[in-house]
Image (tube, coloured by chain):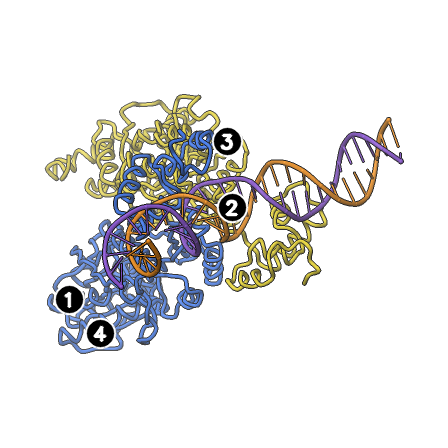
Chain colours: A yellow, B blue, C orange, D purple
Amino acid sequence: MMTNPTAQKGESQLRAASATGRVKLDELAYHLGLSKSTVSRALNGYSDISDATRKRVEVTARKMGYRPLSHAQAIRTGKVRAIAMVINGEEPDRHNPFLQDFLSGACEAASSFDWTMTISTAKSEKDMLKVLGRLVEERKADGFILPRTEVEDARVEYLRELKVPFILYGRTGYGQAAAMENTSWFDISGETAIRNAVIRLAEFGHSSIGYVGSDPKFNYSHLRRDGYVDGLKAAGLEFDPELIRDGARTREEGALEARALMNLKNPPTAIVFATDLAALGCYSVCRDLDLEIGRDVSVIGYDGIPECQYVSPGLTTFSVDSHRAGERLATLLIRQTRGEQPKDLRELSEAVLIERQSDGPPRLKSEDLALKIVNLNDHNRGGDRL
Amino acid sequence: MMTNPTAQKGESQLRAASATGRVKLDELAYHLGLSKSTVSRALNGYSDISDATRKRVEVTARKMGYRPLSHAQAIRTGKVRAIAMVINGEEPDRHNPFLQDFLSGACEAASSFDWTMTISTAKSEKDMLKVLGRLVEERKADGFILPRTEVEDARVEYLRELKVPFILYGRTGYGQAAAMENTSWFDISGETAIRNAVIRLAEFGHSSIGYVGSDPKFNYSHLRRDGYVDGLKAAGLEFDPELIRDGARTREEGALEARALMNLKNPPTAIVFATDLAALGCYSVCRDLDLEIGRDVSVIGYDGIPECQYVSPGLTTFSVDSHRAGERLATLLIRQTRGEQPKDLRELSEAVLIERQSDGPPRLKSEDLALKIVNLNDHNRGGDRL
DNA sequence: AGTCGCTCCGAAACCGGTTTCGGCAACTAA
DNA sequence: TTAGTTGCCGAAACCGGTTTCGGAGCGACT
């Protein structure tokens, strides 16, 4: 084959290389009768390659099944074509039912760009930054997805300082407009959902609607709380500070706050919870107090965890599409690493209402509800907790 | 600094390099007054480096915070210091509550070796092999963790053919001794757990114990079923083929099989389920039939999903330590990629019994249970299903 | 003294890509 | 015709490591 004047290596050597199974750039170039630099540039969209050559290269590359090794590219480009996410291993409730959905969404998006997804876990706040640092230092990823954003998020400052691309799942810096300047994010509008929950309950006829918020450390807690206040206003209801409780991170804490609301002189006939987990805590409280959920007390949650549909009565909630969230986050992040401006890479999506049996028109007025609870407390020597 | 005769580059160039932030091998070598080949070999345990030099290199490397870029190493070594797992996105119940635990275990182990973990998802059986193939071809990982092993597992044959290291979470090839020849695995002995469940129920006084198995496609289904048969034998009970049902993959299917058992002429007073999910299906059946779980019917599950502790009565089950499973699998896999024999990298662990209120001594004999169910069926025009 | 072998290290090739630089041919403008 | 562009491509350097190969220095043994 001496007809090929551009071969850089002897044919025997190319033979040997092709014996390894993978097609390399060298072989592809030899096969095309081009130099490997031309082939590389053709594949990477350089403008100094003629259209005819580019087409020919692309077709042949596909035909021969050529795929560049991302780590071989990375050594020169510094880009490994991977995104990373560090998940927190120390959560109060570690059994995140959405993780699989979320990851499958993110992986699908990454795959579609021929990228991959690497994950890591941190055991604590401090460990989190260390793990991130290690991944950055070893360039294991070109960008990061930061889930569960906090109001003051150390990860954000850290990565911003390092000038590493990242995207938030959620927003951050509640109340400070500048906090998210030039950062990209994807979020579900929890505030809209909670607002709609309040309006829905008001339309059912509830006039005393309570709210149990979540950990104020997380940004979403504040937004959902705003949604509650907003919903009251939209429904023309008065805001009563007694009806609002905060900081329920677990089922047990949800129960605690629900019980506090029910022990009020004027207990709410409906409660909106910032999370399903907390709302499920309300179920045991209502069982203890002999209140029927959906009739005596209406309950609406948020998240759409699978258990909602198996409790009795089924919990009305707002379902979050984790798969899509993962897909969008990965896509936006990859676009960011390709040069798009972070501020142009933001998306706000909506949760969808899942109507079940935990809410409806109030059976009792607040006063009657209070009487029922007091009576029961007398019978039952004050409940088993609190 | 011309005191250093071995410098391969001008000082200015090294300055520039060190401005990037990362310490490179070149700089480390320059700092030590050694060639980069010597430093590299010192760090990688070659024997032709004196102990004194090696120590000196190691100390300085640590002091300067040198970390090799794994993708730069990979280009020569072919090893990327990463393990991968492809999770199946199409499961009937996609909300795997153990994934986070499992991943955190695997990531911790990987991190401790300075490896990383990459994940990907497949949408179908065929997609699975394609995704694996892509990861292998692009050398995104040095080895794979294969979760949810099937009796005949296409992934195993595929990776074996490609000579890519892998480890099973679970066993495979039920009944064929040769199927797992020279393959490594980690598993929890479901058979022991189910066996113990049967013995426990027998000791409570049950003599009619049913069993609802899982999808026979998965290897564990057969092993757990063996455990049931074994347990009967150990307890001196007779095996009744009517009492064994199979193929319950979901809550709904669990309910279906449980109902079939309860409709038997001689219904079991206790049922062991191969999975918690199926066992939870039994709860709705018992509610329909007005049977009290834990008294009229004893139920034992397997898996330890979080919901078990929130249903009423709490489900007695066997808890699997997913965190540890991830940790062991990653560790064994990494050791395999370092040259250890797969057949020496096998571990069998035990699930631990979580005693709750869903099992206990039988209140009724099988005959009386049958009567109660028949009566109810008469009243209720035959139940709402089947 | 010469040879051998051993220990320890440096020079250079190498891995599989990307990117810079320069050169050839064809085409345009003077 | 000639000089200057422009389009297109090859040669070679480069990325940050690893690995091969050979050689200097030294002690031991003839």
- Of mark 2 and mark 3, the one earlier in the sequence is 2
In this rendered view, identify the residue nearer to me: A219 or A13. A13
The chain letter for the residue carrying disc 4 is B
| Residue at image mark 4 | B229
Would you identify the image quadrant in which residue A230 lies? top left
The chain letter for the residue carrying disc 2 is A
In which quadrant is the N terminus of chain A drawn?
A: bottom right
Q: Is residue B119 visible?
A: no
Whether labels 4 and 3 belong to a single chain: the reply is no
Whether labels 2 and 3 belong to a single chain: the reply is yes
| Residue at image mark 3 | A342
| Residue at image mark 2 | A73
In this rendered view, identify the residue nearer to me: B340 or B149. B340
- Please identify, in this view, whether the residue under mark 3 or under mark 1 is nearer the observer: 3
- Please identify, in this view, whether the residue under mark 1 or under mark 4 is nearer the observer: 4
- Please identify, in this view, whether the residue under mark 4 or under mark 2 is nearer the observer: 2
Q: Are marks 3 and 1 in contact (CB under 8 Å)?
A: no
Write the residue at 50% across / 38% down: A332
The amino acid sitting under disc 3 is Pro
Q: Name the spot of residue B250 as percent of width and height, x first.
A: 35, 60
Q: Name the spot of residue A77 as percent of width and height, x first.
A: 51, 41
The amino acid sitting under disc 4 is Val
Real-space Cα distance between discs 1 and 4?
13 Å
| Residue at image mark 1 | B201
Q: Residues within 10 Å of mark 3 (few under 14, many from 20)?
A: many
The amino acid sitting under disc 2 is Gln
